[in-house]
Image (cartoon, helix red, strand yellow):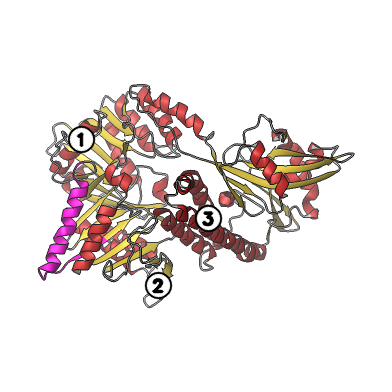
Amino acid sequence: MAQFRYFNRDISWLTFNGRVLQEAANEVVPLMERIRFLSIYSSNLDEFYRVRMPYLKKKSIQDQDEDAYSKAGEIIDRQQNAFGQILRESVIPELANLGVNFCYKDGVPGSILGAVNQYFFAQVAGFLQPVFLTKNAPFFPENNQLYLVAILRFPPDEEHVALVNIPTGNLNRFLKITRDKQDHIVFLEDIIKHNLKSLFPEAIEIQSFNIKITRDAELDMMDEDGDDVAEKFEKQLNKRELGYATRLLYEPGLPLRHLQNIIVSLDLKSASVVQGGRYHNLKDLASLPVSPPAQTYPAWPPATAGANVNENTSLFDTITSEDLMVHAPYQSYDTILRFFNEAAINPLVEEVYTTMYRVAHDSKIAFALISAAKNGKKVTVLVELKARFDEANNIRWAKKMKSAGVKIVHSVNALKVHAKLALVKRKHAAAPYLGLLATGNLNEGTAKFYTDHILLSAHQPMLAEAETLFRFLSKKKKPDSSDLIAFQHLLVAQFNLLGKFLQLLDREIANVRNGLPAGITIKLNNLEEEVLINKLYEASNAGVKINLIVRSICRIVPGVAGQSENITVKRIVDRFLEHGRIFIFHNNGQPEVFMGSADWMNRNIYRRIEVCFPIYNPKLKERLTEIIELQWQDNVQAVFIDSELNNVAIAKSQPLIRSQEAIYRLLSQETADLKTI
């Protein structure tokens, strides 16, 4: 692959999911966490088939990139084989050593058959709705729903095929039964298989196989606007599960003639037909009913953020005196909740603005915004409708906030507001603006396992720019050449973000060419956009040392002579999902540090509203740089991405540094030190 200037974005993402699978195989990782990584891998792959495989197949049909589609299929096949091997040869035997018989290969053991049958008739049978498969059968298989294909032979020698739903939306996927001090865990589909004779009593022979159909998740976006845009969008959401089929996954052994019959009868001719394992939807492994404490990660109670935050001091007063940063999930998210709660009740607060991209299911932030509105404050919330797979929840909260008096603003079609901002405006205050600027969503749920960084600041010029941006976005129009907002502090996509990053990169290039020290360290979730990649190549060729930490999509090809020999890329996968975006420019020994919401992807640079921002406080800048340096030194959970797009293990040397653990210890020690002052 090294002869290419850019890696394929989808193939690079698959190598990230392969890295997740490596953690499932890592015997140093506690057993239940390894099972969780198997679940994450499976969930990721389902989304890939819903979102990216339709695109790759379309490109393949158009003869634009046939190789990427076939290559993706080959990689997925290898990974799926590895998945099954990890489960069969490692995870299941280790469960057995703990006294747990996970009935993965052999179905229902005879010793618990009576209890299983009792459960079937008492709990399961009423949810089953078998449908005989005929050419004109009025049946539409649901997205990612599990079905049993029952091949039935009736006397004298008639053969029929029926589909039986597996009601995982109504019942737990797994049933645990304890006998003689041993736990047996069986799949819901195996319980149904053992009782198919009760569904088809006249059949003299029954064979059964599991299938699953995945459907395209793309929505037909509207160009419409107005007060009812959310209702119109909600109608489109209801059509998502009716999208065309992208994959038919079937159990080995399903006879070819019946497979073809299924494809024709269910109109699956355009779907990828993939032979999987016996069981599908193994993202459900996350709910496996076994949790021995010794087989999970040790608890890391979140530390307190900030030296002066306590129950006797207003958080607003603390922020007014000095910037504060919260490093989630290592530090408590309560500080962020407190920001919104104080805004809701503080009598000096007149206005509250915030963006909400993925709203927590039971959002305390949204409740605080509702209270603020009911307490007479002017509250404006930009709720993003097009946050994929969170649209329905976002619409639900938007309606609830709107009914309480919150002004709800939805972004216009084809433009997402992905920025992570909140702004409080106070009357009669020396510092009227207080702000929150973050790398991740204002979501207390994901804050428990996403690593993000949240700046709380009273920097008045920067926050005045945030107010200008909120007022512009409230107009619900796309930026164009007439929108000449002169941002001096904020880096805003569609305005100055791309140009500013290019200037910062050019400065490092100029410095190294003038014999001055130079360097670039960047941490991203995804790196795709070619203008910025080309500038990084230019910097590498000029002699600038470039360190990149890229979690998933990475199109830059490192370590290629004459192109990128000064570029090194690492990827970190551990107990928390790496999510922060951080940019450090050496600047001849006077480092400039930025954080923000923007990955370097086409969509973030050209089709979204993103906000990055400088870190001015010297102590916060130093601490953030220290955290990134620990991540760069990671030789336990980090891997190199090489010029062939492989995840390459880093040679273990002393000291062993697992960056997430080191960061947790660093921030916990900081809290302990502050308590002694």
Position of 438 compared to 425: left or right?
right
> Amino acid under label 1?
Asp
Q: Is residue 316 above or below residue 659?
A: above
Position in image of residue 423 (x %, y %): 23, 37
> Which residue is drawn at the image coordinates 30% and 58% (left, top)?
523
Choose the circle earlier in sequence order: 3 or 2: 3
Q: Is-magenta flag for residue 508?
A: yes
Q: Tag on residue 73?
A: 3
Earlier residue among tags 2 and 1? 1
Q: CA distance from mark 3 to mark 1?
A: 41 Å
State the image coordinates of residue 366 (x, y, percent, origin top left): 36, 34
- Quadrant where the C terminus sits is bottom left
In the picture, measured across the screen, residue 362 lies left or right of residue 459, that is: right
Residue displayed at 80% across by 41% down: 152
Q: Nearer the viewer, residue 643 or 653?
A: 643
| Amino acid type shown at disc 2 | Ile
Q: Position of residue 149 (x, y in %)?
A: 71, 43
Frontmost of labels 3 and 1 is: 3
Q: Which residue is the site of mark 2?
A: 650
Alpha-carbon neighbours of circle 2 within 10 Å: few (<14), some, or many (≥20)?
some
- Choose between 351 and 11: the one closer to the eye: 11
Count neighbours of disc 1 (C-alpha within 10 A) and say few if under 14, some if 14 to 19, many if 20 or more. Answer: few
Label 2 residue SS: loop
Kindly check if marks 2 and 1 are in contact, taking CB atoms under 8 A apart as contact: no
Magenta part of the chain: 495-521
Residue 314 seen in the figure: no
Contact check, label 3 and label 1, Cβ < 8 Å: no
Numbered mark located on residue 384 in the image:
none
Which quadrant of the rendered structure holds the N terminus?
A: bottom left
From what the image shows, is residue 387 above or below residue 12? above
**In the rendered image, which residue does mark 1 sit on?**
480
